[in-house]
Amino acid sequence: MRAPAVADQFYPANKDELADMISTFLSNVDSKIIDAKLDGVDKLYGGVAPHAGYIYSGQTAAYTYSALERLNKDTDTFILFGPNHTGLGSPVSVSSDKWRTPFGVVEPDLDIIKKIPPLIIDRSEVAHIYEHSIEVQLPFLQYIFGNFKIVPIILGMQDQETVLEVADSILNAISGLNKNITFIASSDFSHYVPEQVAYQKDKKLIDKIENLDVPGLYKVLYEENVSACGYGCISTVMDISKRFGAKVGRFLKYSTSGDVSGDRLQVVGYASIVI
């Protein structure tokens, strides 16, 4: 059993407090934005959500999950990609464990996990034990979707070649399975820069995500030195979604830590995007 690593740090460990917090976030989502962005859309392949402490990024994450609730309510399995902040474990690894949160236990989708080719993705728990990037997504999913399974994948390597290999492996594993699958990329955007710099750099990255332009994303990332931590996770979801037929990403919400802390000189950027 994978025990919570950041409960009472990134989000409340008390079930009722956690439910109240998520409920408030969801009720504060501007439904007009969701209506406009999803007009004419009948399916989403996945989304991008931040992974900071809920007090800072939870409201922005709620936009992604509100949109997914509207169109992907029948999801059987969420395949989640998170960056490796701890440096532990394999370059890319999938967890086969059950994950516990204050809301209960989430089961791994072993049907998919066992079919992942033993190439770029290792089956290992080491990178997952203390990593928060996937953990903080689960309470939102549990609150909204109830019963589902997960395939949690941590990327320590996020170069473009690795991303394409990971996407290939996942597409191979889910081929022929009769499951409704939604893909989640866990990522914050610019880290510890003045807010205006974060706005400018993150907008350029978001433009590439909206166009599902993976090479363009890497070009902006390197040329602008954007310190988004889960860029490979985002790129993986972009690539998979594009191969399923997605044409565009839909930007929903942007915020920074400065909106809560009041410190505009050293902010972290957060974005909500669905594909």
Image (cartoon, rainbow, N blue to C red):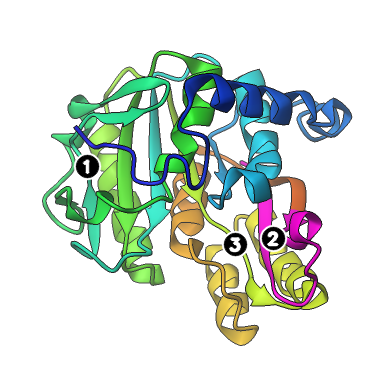
Q: Residues within 10 Å of mark 2 (few under 14, many from 20)?
A: many
Residue at mark 3 = 213
Inspect the image, locate mark 1, and give the three-letter code of the amino acid beneath it: Ser
- Between the residue at mark 1 and the residue at mark 2, the CA separation in whole angstroms equals 29 Å
- Between the residue at mark 2 and the residue at mark 3, the CA separation in whole angstroms equals 10 Å
Considering the image in quadrants, where does the N terminus appear?
A: top left
Q: Residues within 10 Å of mark 1 (few under 14, many from 20)?
A: many
Above or below, 259 against 110 in this view is: below
Inspect the image, locate mark 3, and give the three-letter code of the amino acid beneath it: Asp
Residue pictured at 52% horizontal, 51% vertical? 238
Residue at mark 1 = 95
Residue pictured at 38% horizontal, 67% vertical? 158
List x then y, in percent, for residue 100: 31, 29
Left or right relative to 256: residue 159: left
- Based on the picture, tell me whether residue 257 belongs to the magenta stretch: yes
Residue pictured at 41% horizontal, 52% vertical? 82
Q: Secondary structure at mark 2?
A: helix
Q: Secondary structure at mark 1?
A: loop
Q: Which mark, residue 206?
A: 2
